[in-house]
Image (spheres, grey):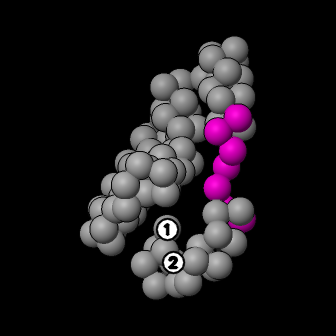
């Protein structure tokens, strides 16, 4: 998502295809997480790839979002990933 601020539309679409996870895959991970009785942190980590997709779909189909919204989304996603890494460390390493 950081590239969205600086690159062309073609490069942004390429990044979409390379780095985004399908919502179907995320749903499958959530179902498997529940079946395998994984912790809440695992389920939350499975949902992280959906955040950029929701913003991208809203930007494309609902209304055009200004650049600061993309920056806020990047910051929130990075904070969420960092918190989940700390939680995973506390749960699985300690």
- Label 1: few (<14), some (14–19) or many (≥20) C-alpha neighbours in 10 Å: some
Q: Depth check: 72 or 12 in front? A: 12
At mark 2, the secondary structure is helix
Q: Count the marks.
A: 2
Q: Is residue 74 above or below residue 34?
A: below
Magenta-highlighted residues: 18-24
- In the displayed structure image, the side of residue 30 where residue 88 appears, left or right: left
At mark 1, the secondary structure is loop
Instruction: Give residue 69's quadrant in the image.
Output: bottom left
Residue 31 seen anywhere in this rendered image of the structure:
yes
- In the displayed structure image, the side of residue 28 where residue 90 appears, left or right: left
Q: Position of residue 37 (x, y in %)?
A: 63, 16
Cα distance in 3D space between marks 1 and 2: 5 Å
- Label 2: few (<14), some (14–19) or many (≥20) C-alpha neighbours in 10 Å: few
Marks 1 & 2, CB-CB < 8 Å contact: yes
Residue in view at x 42 percent, y 41 percent = 87
Q: Which residue is mark 2?
A: 3
Q: Depth check: 90 or 53 in front? A: 53
Residue in view at x 48 percent, y 51 percent = 61
Q: Is residue 48 above or below residue 16?
A: above
User: Does the segment drawn in magenta span residue 23?
Assistant: yes
Instruction: Give residue 27's quadrant in the image.
Output: top right
Q: Depth check: 8 or 22 in front? A: 8
Q: Position of residue 75 (x, y in %)?
A: 33, 62
Mark drawn on residue 28:
none
Q: Which residue is mark 1?
A: 1
Q: Position of residue 24 (x, y in %)?
A: 70, 35
Residue 55 seen anywhere in this rendered image of the structure:
no
């Amino acid at each position: 998502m950081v590239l969205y601020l600086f690159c062309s539309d073609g490069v942004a679409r390429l990044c979409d295809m390379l780095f985004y996870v399908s919502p179907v895959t995320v749903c499958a991970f959530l179902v498997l997480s529940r079946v395998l009785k994984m912790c809440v942190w695992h389920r939350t980590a499975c949902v992280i790839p959906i955040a950029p997709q929701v913003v991208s779909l809203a930007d494309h189909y609902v209304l055009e979002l200004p650049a600061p919204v993309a920056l806020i989304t990047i910051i929130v996603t990075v904070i969420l990933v960092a918190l989940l890494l700390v939680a995973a460390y506390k749960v699985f390493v300690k």
